[in-house]
Image (spheres, rainbow, N blue to C red):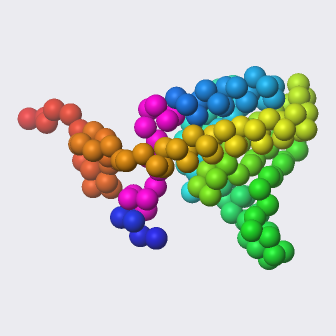
Amino acid sequence: MDNKQLRETRLVFYQDLVRDVNRLLREFLKLSNAKCAMLVDKEGHMVTRQGVTRDLDMETISALVAGSFAATKEMARVRGEDEFSVLFHQGVRESIHVSTVDKETILLAIFDDRTTVGMVRLFAKEACRAIGTVLAEARTQPRRVGALAAPLTADEARTDIGPKKR
């Protein structure tokens, strides 16, 4: 898929969509007792996050999780599966639960010993279903138009914004 086609087909996360996803992430955190929840696209970009994240490099974690998910998808393909939809990484102090929301997004949960992997997995499954429904609905909506509604192109992103220095 070339860049133009990607820009035209990719879901744009407008403020109201992020607000709805954040509400679902907060509900997930409350029910599961996880520390942090993130929605990440499969290219490794963090879409949004909720919970305790002050000492985490979220951009790096997003990229690594997407890479891990891509590698695991390839392992599934080799085994004759479409994908393995859930990953779990257990650490000494914290663990990570990763699950598929839809074909473009991943839910990441970071949790510690205040909860169990079973609780996180149970409520992650519900959260993925709810977030997937919100994203599917957003994909049916027409794209917003106007200069401020569309994402920046690469050239626009490189342009200086603001008053010109004389």
Where's the C terminus, which quadrant? top left
Picture coordinates of residue 159 (x, y %)? Answer: 24, 47
Q: Main secondary structure of the magenta part?
A: helix
Q: Residue furthest left?
A: 166
Q: Nearer the viewer, residue 57 or 45?
A: 45
Picture coordinates of residue 102 (x, y %)? Answer: 64, 53
Q: Nearer the viewer, residue 154 or 97?
A: 97
The answer to whether 97 is drawn above or below residue 155 in the figure is above
Residue at image coords 84%, 48%: 89
Q: Is residue 67 left or right of residue 164?
A: right
Q: Is residue 70 left or right of residue 162?
A: right
Residue at image coords 27%, 50%: 156
Q: Nearer the viewer, residue 74 or 157?
A: 74
The answer to whether 42 is drawn above or below residue 55 in the figure is below
The image quadrant that residue 38 belongs to is: top right
Picture coordinates of residue 111 (x, y %)? Answer: 81, 33
Q: Is residue 62 visible?
A: no
The image quadrant that residue 3 belongs to is: bottom left
Residue at image coords 33%, 43%: 144
Q: Is residue 78 visible?
A: yes
| Residue 133 within the magenta-colored segment of the rendering | no
Number of numbered discs overlaid on the protein picture: 0
Picture coordinates of residue 5 (x, y %)? Answer: 39, 65
Residue at image coords 81%, 29%: 32
Q: Is residue 69 left or right of residue 44?
A: right
The image quadrant that residue 73 belongs to is: bottom right
Q: Which residues are magenta?
A: 6-18
